[in-house]
Each structure stands twice: as structure tokens, then as C-alpha cells.
Image (cartoon, rainbow, N blue to C red):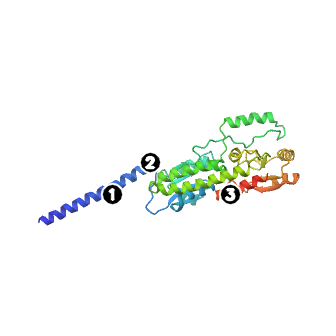
């Protein structure tokens, strides 16, 4: 009889301990959920959604084999007009983390509320937090560009354009900004998966070192570049700011340039002895080819949305060094 009582007591103790452990796990899970973190099962990859292609490398560099990355806007698509596919929305609904650009990117302005509401427990990381945004240069001009439009009238429009808070969204084109974005991504991954903090930290530090090397090499490559760079879509303003370049965008407010605008660009190119002009692969090169044919220049492609960030930005620097 005494042995039976001891066995029952042992069984009760085991049940109490097991119940306590289960309740503890449930409490942690509840706290994580209330804090907006959707915990993963051991060995399960963290589902991370990103808005644009350069973020893919950032997340993979830090997350390594512990993340499964889904890209929303393909590198060949227009971030101003792209609509997410049902398959992408399904990925969002089960993701643990979304890395948004956070600099008023039009795709995010159009869809972020919907994406958040489809997965309230998903952690949303603003990767541009800590980056000083600059006013958009799209549409800024210094000379007459359209019939009946003078520099004076456009100056008023430009001031109004900046006062209304229209900022340049292309923060990722600066390797120095990319360092800030990568660190924000690291902090997000640690919040979702704190057990692997050291792993993420090691990966982050290794990638930041590569960005530092890219920055040093680019600074040396573009030192003392004084010619203005003629580019179709002004997506590299942050890059130009970091490396003391002057860039003039041919496209105005995402609209095709008028014949007057093309003529003005030809004049600028001739005045500055420009021998290379640039266009992004997302756009029809015909306008830059027209300018190039009139001044005897070469047309080069520079991509602001390539998924292979380090290699692409190295190539961008080489291309701009030919200006």
C-alpha cells in the first residue's frame, strides 16, 4: 500500500511539473504573439517578405540558412504600378517578418496596410529607419523645359514639391545607407528569433565589412568626377550625394520626356562634353539613344534594382567612372 501511495505521489509530481512546463511555453508564445512576433518551430525557416530585390541579398546575408525570403516587386517590374499576386499574398499571410523600405515607396504606400491586416502578428521592419531622407529630384530643372514653362515658374513648383514632403525613395542605392538597412534587418531577425542572435550578428558583421570595402573602392573610383551624369531616371540621388556626383535626370515625374526636354539634355551634354549617358534596364532606352546619337555618346545601363547588390553596385561604380 505504501508503495502504491509513493507511485501516485510521484505521478502527481510529474503531472504538475509537465503542466508547468507546458503553461510556461504557452505564456511565452502568448507574449510573443501580443508583441507582434510570430514564433517559429525549431528547425523551421523564418518567412521574410521584402518589397524590392536589393533587400533579398540583405536578408539572406544576415539570415543565412535560417530564412526563406519572398520578393514582392520583381526587379523588372515598376514599383509605382505593381500589384501583388495571390501567391505572394499567401506567403505574406504566413510570414514572420516583413522588411519594408519605409521611404514612401509607392508600392508600400499602396499595399502595406492590406499586407499588415492579412497577418497582424507579422513583425514589420522599417529598413530605412535612421536614414536621412532627401527631397526627390524628379522634376527638378534649371532651364526652360516645356513650352511656356520657365525656370522661374518651375522653381516655384519645385519649392512646393519639396514642402509637401515628397522624398526620394531610393535609399538603398547608397552603400552607406545599405549598412543602416542591414542593421535594421538584423535587429528584426533577433526580435523574431532571439535564440540565434550570435549567428545573425556574425553574418551581419561579415556583410557590413563587405559594404565598407565597396564604399572605400567606390570613393576611390569616383574621386574628382566633375562632369554631370545624364541618366534617364534619377534613382541614384543618395549615391550621388555620398560620392559628390552631379546627376541630371531626363525623365520628369515618371513621364516620358518631351522633345523640348530632350533638346535641353542635348545642350547640357554638349556643353559638358558628355560622352556617356545612362538608363536603367526597367525603362525603354530609346530616349537616351536619341540623345546619344546627337552627341556621339555611348549608352550604358545601370540597375538600381538588381538582387545581387554588392556585385551590381560595383558595376554601377565602374559605369559611372566612365562619365
Mark 2–mark 1 Cα distance, whole angstroms, equals 20 Å
Q: Does dot 3 land on a helix, a strand or a loop?
A: helix
Mark 1–mark 3 Cα distance, whole angstroms, equals 49 Å
Horizontally, residue 237 falls left or right of residue 11, namely right
Q: Does dot 2 land on a helix, a strand or a loop?
A: loop
On residue 141, which mark appears? none
Residue drawn 68% across the image and 57% down it: 312
Tags 2 and 1 touching, CB below 8 Å: no
Residue 19 rendering spot, x and y as whole percentages: 29, 57
Mark 3–mark 2 Cα distance, whole angstroms, equals 37 Å
Q: Who comes first in sequence, dot 3 or dot 2?
A: 2
Q: Residues within 10 Å of mark 3 (few under 14, many from 20)?
A: some
Residue 183 visible in the snapshot: yes
Residue 311 rendering spot, x and y as whole percentages: 67, 59
The label nearer to you, 3 versus 2, is: 3
Residue 270's place in the image compared with 62, above or below, is above
Horizontally, residue 309 falls left or right of residue 3, namely right
On residue 312, which mark appears? 3
Residue 106 rendering spot, x and y as whole percentages: 64, 47
Q: Who comes first in sequence, dot 2 or dot 1?
A: 1
Q: Which residue is mark 2?
A: 35
Residue 69 rendering spot, x and y as whole percentages: 56, 59
Q: Who comes first in sequence, dot 1 or dot 3?
A: 1
Residue drawn 69% across the image and 48% down it: 239
On residue 22, which mark appears? 1
The label nearer to you, 1 versus 3, is: 3
Residue 74 visible in the snapshot: no
| Number of marks | 3
Residue 237's place in the image compared with 54, above or below, is above
Q: Residues within 10 Å of mark 1 (few under 14, many from 20)?
A: few
Amino acid at each position: 500500500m505504501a508503495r502504491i501511495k509513493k507511485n501516485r505521489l510521484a505521478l502527481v509530481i510529474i503531472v504538475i511539473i509537465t503542466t508547468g512546463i507546458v503553461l510556461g511555453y504557452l505564456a511565452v508564445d502568448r507574449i510573443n504573439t501580443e508583441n507582434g512576433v510570430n514564433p517559429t518551430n525549431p528547425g523551421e525557416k523564418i518567412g521574410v517578405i521584402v518589397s524590392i530585390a536589393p533587400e533579398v541579398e540583405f536578408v539572406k546575408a544576415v539570415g543565412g540558412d535560417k530564412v526563406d525570403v519572398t520578393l514582392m516587386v520583381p526587379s523588372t517590374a515598376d514599383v509605382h504600378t505593381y500589384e501583388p499576386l495571390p501567391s505572394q499574398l499567401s506567403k505574406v499571410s504566413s510570414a514572420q517578418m516583413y522588411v519594408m523600405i519605409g521611404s514612401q515607396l509607392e508600392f508600400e504606400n499602396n499595399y502595406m496596410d492590406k499586407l499588415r491586416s492579412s497577418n497582424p502578428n507579422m513583425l514589420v521592419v522599417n529598413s530605412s529607419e535612421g536614414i536621412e531622407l532627401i527631397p526627390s529630384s524628379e522634376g527638378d530643372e534649371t532651364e526652360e523645359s516645356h513650352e511656356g514653362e520657365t525656370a522661374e515658374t518651375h522653381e516655384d513648383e519645385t519649392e512646393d514639391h519639396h514642402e509637401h514632403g515628397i522624398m526620394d525613395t531610393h535609399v538603398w542605392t547608397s552603400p552607406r545607407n545599405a549598412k543602416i538597412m542591414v542593421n535594421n534587418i538584423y535587429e528584426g531577425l533577433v526580435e523574431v528569433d532571439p535564440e540565434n542572435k550570435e549567428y545573425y550578428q556574425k553574418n551581419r558583421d561579415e556583410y557590413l565589412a563587405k559594404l565598407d570595402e565597396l564604399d572605400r573602392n567606390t570613393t576611390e573610383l569616383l574621386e574628382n568626377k566633375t562632369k554631370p551624369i545624364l541618366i534617364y531616371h534619377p534613382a541614384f540621388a543618395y549615391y550621388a550625394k555620398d560620392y559628390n556626383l552631379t546627376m541630371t535626370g531626363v525623365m520628369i515625374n515618371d513621364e516620358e520626356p518631351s522633345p523640348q526636354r530632350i533638346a535641353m539634355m542635348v545642350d547640357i551634354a554638349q556643353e559638358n562634353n558628355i560622352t556617356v549617358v545612362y538608363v536603367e534596364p526597367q525603362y525603354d532606352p530609346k530616349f537616351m539613344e536619341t540623345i546619344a546619337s546627337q552627341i556621339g555618346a555611348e549608352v550604358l545601363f545601370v540597375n538600381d534594382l538588381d538582387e545581387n547588390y554588392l556585385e551590381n553596385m560595383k558595376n554601377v561604380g565602374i559605369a559611372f567612372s566612365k562619365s
